[in-house]
Image (cartoon, helix red, strand yellow):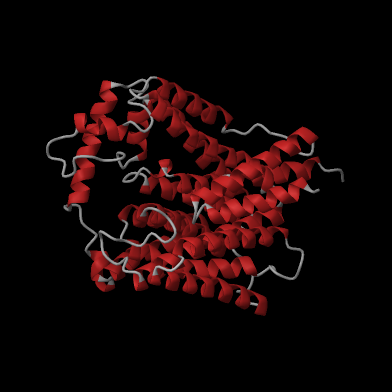
């Protein structure tokens, strides 16, 4: 039994399902971790030290300490279990060190993202998810999670295309059939949801089929997928994800996407940045009224963020070392809420840095900033090693990190399990490239 191939298939299933079902993704992650541990025991794999070991360990330890000092330690410790998701980072570094596995796992992620974005568009068009209060969320529980993931998939697809060399690919008959089957299955699922007929069961079957397809992308030794399948997935993903992102009416995801695309333009062709003002002018002149109507800072949502940030600062002043405790913000917010805030409650503070500092203390914020800075620095160094070839992967990681940080100024996306899993998967790419290079250098001539 080839445990390494099993691990690759499971990681591909995680890559696809983390975009549509956190329950399925966590199951496949657990199976993949068990497989990796079995390989470690057998000596067919090794756990290497990474530059993130220090900040990750410090962040985890301080989070546990913060939970211990929380007003309700049991609830806080249940929230800290999200730290287990960081195992995906080490798992992905080991899995993606192989060039072919890396390409196919990213294909699986793009397939999951394509399904997510298409599902959001179908919801908007046919299921009544077309108002500001009822926005499309596709397979997920919240529209902001869906928008954040669509943002990430769009940037990965754009990076893959921007750093591609050679002629544009032509779809094979097998590619056309495969994409048609996925589109037909989504149409049937939408029809069942519209009729409220076996909708839950159909969605579960669809997610299971998606996971199986993702695993087959990595494990197949047949004629499909071929060398053009990944590029075709990226070509399809860019316009569909763009449409889904606009329909989401989610401003933090728009800002993050803009920052990520500007980053890719800077890395690939800095002169293209001159097109940015022209694009902004075209959007203002031709943009749909629904989109332009969201470009405001005077609405209740924007004002609520301002006042909840003020409350967050007060929380930090009150408990600067260990914070209020993980998952305690919603419970303590009424005591810190400013009278001018439109909403009496909030689940989080809609800002990554403020949320982490208020929940877990300023030292934990320092570890988090160290971790993010290390990820950005390592991705940047891999980009500078070579823009083309495998360099697209490092560019995708760098652009996604920038996008998540910018979107995270107005949303606590780091605490969203689906977005965190996708971010960890993509952020592992520069370290996987480094491991591949080290393995090639150590191989006998």
Question: Which residue is rendered at x = 25% and y = 67% of the image?
Answer: 290
Residue 221, compared with residue 367, is above or below; it is below
Question: Which residue is rendered at x = 53% and y = 71% of the image?
Answer: 185
Q: Nearer the viewer, residue 275 or 157?
A: 157
Name the image quarter holding residue 197. Answer: bottom left
Q: How many marks?
A: 0
Q: Position of residue 313 (x, y in %)?
A: 25, 30
Q: Position of residue 174 (x, y in %)?
A: 66, 76
Residue furthest left as drawn? 339
Q: Position of residue 106 (x, y in %)?
A: 60, 57
**Residue 209 can be seen, yes or no:** yes
Question: From the viewer's perspective, is 313 left or right of 357?
Answer: left
Residue furthest front as drawn? 197
Question: Which residue is rendered at x = 56% and y = 41% of the image?
Answer: 378
Residue 383, compared with residue 220, is above or below; it is above
Question: From the viewer's perspective, is 65 left or right of 310?
Answer: right
Q: Nearer the viewer, residue 259 or 232?
A: 232
Residue 171, compared with residue 353, is above or below; it is below
Q: Position of residue 400 (x, y in %)?
A: 48, 50
Question: Which residue is rendered at x = 28% and y = 70% of the image?
Answer: 287
Residue furthest bottom as drawn? 173
**Residue 163 can be seen, yes or no:** no
Q: Nearer the viewer, residue 338 or 202?
A: 202
Q: Nearer the viewer, residue 289 or 273?
A: 289
């Amino acid at each position: 039994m080839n445990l390494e191939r099993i691990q690759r298939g499971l990681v591909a299933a995680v890559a696809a399902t983390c975009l549509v079902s956190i329950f399925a993704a966590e199951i496949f992650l657990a199976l993949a971790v068990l497989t990796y541990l079995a390989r470690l025991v057998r000596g067919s794999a090794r756990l290497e030290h990474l530059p993130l070991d220090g900040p990750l360990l410090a962040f985890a330890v301080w989070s546990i300490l913060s939970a211990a000092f929380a007003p309700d330690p049991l609830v806080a410790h249940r929230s800290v279990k999200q730290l287990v998701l960081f195992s995906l980072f080490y798992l992905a570094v080991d899995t993606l060190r192989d060039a072919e596995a890396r390409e196919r796992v990213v294909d699986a992620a793009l397939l999951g993202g394509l399904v997510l974005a298409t599902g959001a568009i179908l919801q908007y068009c046919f299921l009544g998810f077309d108002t500001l209060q009822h926005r499309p969320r596709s397979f997920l529980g919240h529209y902001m999670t869906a928008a954040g993931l669509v943002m990430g998939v769009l940037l990965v697809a754009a990076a893959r295309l921007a750093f591609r060399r050679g002629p544009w690919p032509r779809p094979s008959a097998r590619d056309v059939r495969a994409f048609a089957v996925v589109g037909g299955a989504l149409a049937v699922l939408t029809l069942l949801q519209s009729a409220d007929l076996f909708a839950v069961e159909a969605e579960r079957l669809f997610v299971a089929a998606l996971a199986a397809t993702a695993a087959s992308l990595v494990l197949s030794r047949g004629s499909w997928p071929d060398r053009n399948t990944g590029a075709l997935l990226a070509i399809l993903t860019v316009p569909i994800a763009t449409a889904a992102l606009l329909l989401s009416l989610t401003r933090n995801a728009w800002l993050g996407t803009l920052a990520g695309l500007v980053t890719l333009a800077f890395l690939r062709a800095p002169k293209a940045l001159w097109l940015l003002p022209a694009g902004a002018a075209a959007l203002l002149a031709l943009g749909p009224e629904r989109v332009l109507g969201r470009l405001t800072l005077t609405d209740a949502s924007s004002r609520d963020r301002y006042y909840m940030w003020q409350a967050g600062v007060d929380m930090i002043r009150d408990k600067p070392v260990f914070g209020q405790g993980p998952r305690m913000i919603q419970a303590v917010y009424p005591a810190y809420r400013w009278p001018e805030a439109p909403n009496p409650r909030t689940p989080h503070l809609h800002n990554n840095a403020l949320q982490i500092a208020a929940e877990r203390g300023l030292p934990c914020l320092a570890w988090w900033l160290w971790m993010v800075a290390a990820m950005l620095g390592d991705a940047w160094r891999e980009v500078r090693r070579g823009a083309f070839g495998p360099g697209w992967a490092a560019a995708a990681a760098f652009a996604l990190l920038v996008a998540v940080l910018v979107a995270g100024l107005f949303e606590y996306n780091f605490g969203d399990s689906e977005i965190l899993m996708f971010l960890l998967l993509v952020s592992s790419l520069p370290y996987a490239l480094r491991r591949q290079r080290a393995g090639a250098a150590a191989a006998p001539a």
